[in-house]
């Protein structure tokens, strides 16, 4: 096998087709999109070279900064919620429910496979205020509190959206982290218990340090997913009210495909890609320092 891997022709035969497909599907569209950032127009009206005008416009665009702030806030809240609740559920599965956890794991994982539109419809009904109160407003009214237009205000709409996406994805991270917990050798946990490490001390000093690589991977995975959120926002709030819940992805989509500004939309997409790359690099840097 080592002899084969040292033969450049053999490597080219084995790796070449995969590299070709990778280049055609991923690299060429990225390079093409970067090229669009120096043009303005559309396929119908034609393209005009504008140099760095799209980047200058981006720096002066208040709606872009609002979308960037929403994406950042959404990433911090939702990624923290997804991984933290996933970790708590994984600990519950492993240390308390044990063999009886299979049914609970299935139920907790179920929202992951539900269509986004169906989940958004459920939450829209839960938090509805008209034509009749949803369950949340009905409970508020039961306790003598005033009903809230949850999706009609920017602040409350953000939290409804965050709760929905945390609920949808925490089962995925629970199962992922549970697999990491199962891989921890039983003799390590047993030895720690004999030394007096039980309950939270066992989790703090034994379990969490062993789970750090998987936690970092989960966090990077979650942050990149939440930065690129699109379908949840479109289905539940459509970016509203106003532009209060518009992330970078939706702003890019509207610039490119509703306003026919392909060049400006590509510039927003490039900024989003660089932002995702920066967040991932920071997380990797933190992970390496922590492991060291």
Image (cartoon, rainbow, N blue to C red):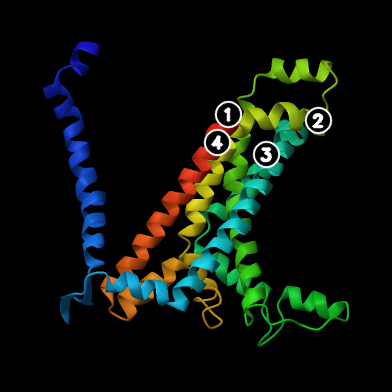
Q: Secondary structure at mark 4?
A: helix
Q: Secondary structure at mark 3?
A: helix
Quadrant hosting residue 179: top right
Mark 2–mark 4 distance (CA, rounded to whole Å)? 22 Å
N-terminal-most mark, 1 or 3: 3
Mark 1–mark 2 distance (CA, rounded to whole Å)? 20 Å
What residue is disc 4 on?
Answer: 287
Q: Secondary structure at mark 2?
A: helix
Dot 3 crowding, Cα within 10 Å, few <14, some 14–19, many 20+? many
Mark toward the viewer: 1 or 3: 1
What residue is disc 1 on?
Answer: 291
Circles 1 and 2: CB distance less than 8 Å?
no
Task: Using the rendered image of the protein, determine whether residue 1 is visible from the camera's viewpoint.
Answer: no
What residue is disc 2 on?
Answer: 201
Quadrant hosting residue 69: bottom right
N-terminal-most mark, 4 or 3: 3
């Amino acid at each position: 096998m080592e002899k084969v891997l040292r033969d450049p022709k053999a490597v080219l035969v084995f790796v070449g087709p995969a590299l070709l497909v990778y280049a055609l599907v991923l690299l060429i569209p990225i390079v093409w999109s970067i090229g669009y950032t120096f043009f303005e127009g559309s396929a119908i009206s034609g393209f005009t070279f504008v140099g760095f005008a799209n980047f200058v416009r981006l720096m002066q665009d208040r709606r872009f900064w609002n979308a960037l702030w929403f994406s950042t806030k959404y990433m911090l809240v939702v990624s923290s919620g997804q991984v933290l609740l996933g970790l708590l559920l994984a600990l519950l599965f492993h240390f308390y429910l044990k063999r009886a956890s299979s049914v609970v794991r299935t139920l907790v994982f179920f929202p992951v496979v539900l269509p986004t539109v169906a989940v958004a419809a459920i939450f829209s009904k839960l938090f509805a205020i008209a034509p009749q109160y949803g369950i949340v407003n009905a409970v508020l009214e039961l306790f003598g509190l005033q009903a809230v237009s949850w999706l009609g205000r920017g602040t409350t709409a953000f939290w409804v959206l965050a709760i929905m996406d945390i609920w949808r994805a925490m089962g995925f991270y629970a199962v992922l982290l549970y697999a990491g917990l199962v891989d921890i050798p039983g003799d390590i946990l047993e030895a720690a218990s004999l030394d007096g490490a039980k309950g939270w001390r066992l989790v703090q000093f034994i379990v969490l340090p062993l789970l750090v690589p998987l936690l970092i991977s989960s966090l990077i995975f979650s942050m990149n997913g939440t930065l690129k959120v699109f379908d949840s926002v479109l289905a539940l709030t459509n970016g509203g009210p106003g532009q209060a819940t518009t992330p970078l992805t939706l702003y890019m989509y509207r610039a490119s495909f509703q306003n026919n500004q392909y060049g400006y939309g590509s510039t927003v997409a490039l900024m989003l890609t660089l932002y995702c790359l920066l967040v991932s690099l920071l997380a990797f840097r933190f992970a390496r320092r922590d492991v060291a």
